[in-house]
Amino acid sequence: MKLKEKTEYLWEKYNFTPKKELGQNFLIDPGIVDRIIESSKLTKADTVVEVGAGTGVLTERLAKSAGKVIGVEIDEKLCQILKEELADYDNLKIICGDIEQFCFQKRFTQSQSVKIVGNLPYQIASSFLLNLARKEWIKFMVVMVQREVAEKLLARPGEKKRGTLTVLMNYYTIINRVINAPPQVFIPAPKVASSLIRIDRKENRLAKNEDRFMSVVKGAFRLRRKMLVNALSSELGKDKTLIKERLNRIGIDGKRRAEDLTVEEFVRISEAL
């Protein structure tokens, strides 16, 4: 049975209708499912947290490869489908609840080698990824996001799409695009295209004070049309002459704008200030 047919069969069997307000779009392309499994490089030593387990198309593949799978699904009807259809997998636990609450309250240890896999709801993707990127227990993430989010994450210095999310995510992680996904690989088809990306946490980070680093990045991009010296002076409440002097000291032109700077340059600025 093809994935589309299987998905529609389960919907009918359990009297389920996708909810637009929850951003429910179900993956029906086996090739992309294969790419997710391939990119996750699962072993029996791995614990996997699946975001939005849905009808279990990906969940079952994860359970066959990983040591432990925790499928988190907010929809109670889908939780019923998962628990009944995948009852034979002893290494699978279904959590019926909000993925954000689960990930930010649950404590894992680094020895568990936790991997995050799934199709992120478009409305929470940016904040969710940034919060997860700072969790020490996450080894890496293989997630489907809106194409626009992927383009922001991958934007290079000088590109207009580059922003606070770009710099902060690239400070904490290494991001690679696995494959682009058109709307028709989901049912119901979303109005936007998607991208599958892999996000690996960096072991070593450069900033001595990460809160100060984040303040500098956010301040620079909040007034992104202004020159760097003016934006930082306004947002950080520091004398413009002082900021200009510190920037000159580390060889950074205060006339540049936030989108032109590398992650390493932002680190140098935060240390200089």
Image (cartoon, grey):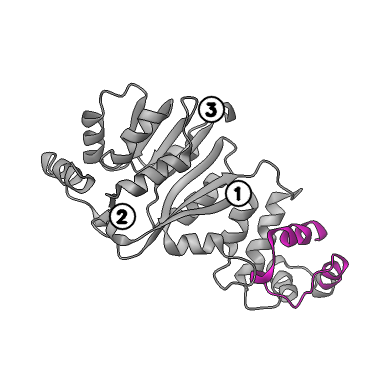
The part of the chain drawn in magenta is 244-273
First in sequence, mark 3 or 1: give its number. Answer: 3
Q: Nearer the viewer, residue 201 or 80?
A: 201
Q: Answer with left or right where residue 128 lies relative to residue 192.
A: right
Q: Residue 98 location in percent, x, y?
A: 37, 42
Under circle 2, the secondary element is loop
Q: Residue 189 location in percent, x, y?
A: 26, 59
Q: Residue 9 location in percent, x, y?
A: 14, 43
- The residue wearing badge 1 is 173
Q: CA distance from mark 3 to mark 1?
A: 19 Å
Tell which tag, 2 or 3, sits nearer the viewer: 3
Q: Amino acid at mark 1?
A: Thr
Neighbours of disc 2 within 10 Å: few (<14), some (14-19), many (20+): some
First in sequence, mark 1 or 2: give its number. Answer: 2
Q: Answer with left or right where residue 45 lies relative to residue 194.
A: right
Q: Amino acid at mark 3?
A: Gln
Residue located at (64% from left, 44% from top): 202
Q: Residue 73 location in percent, x, y?
A: 32, 40
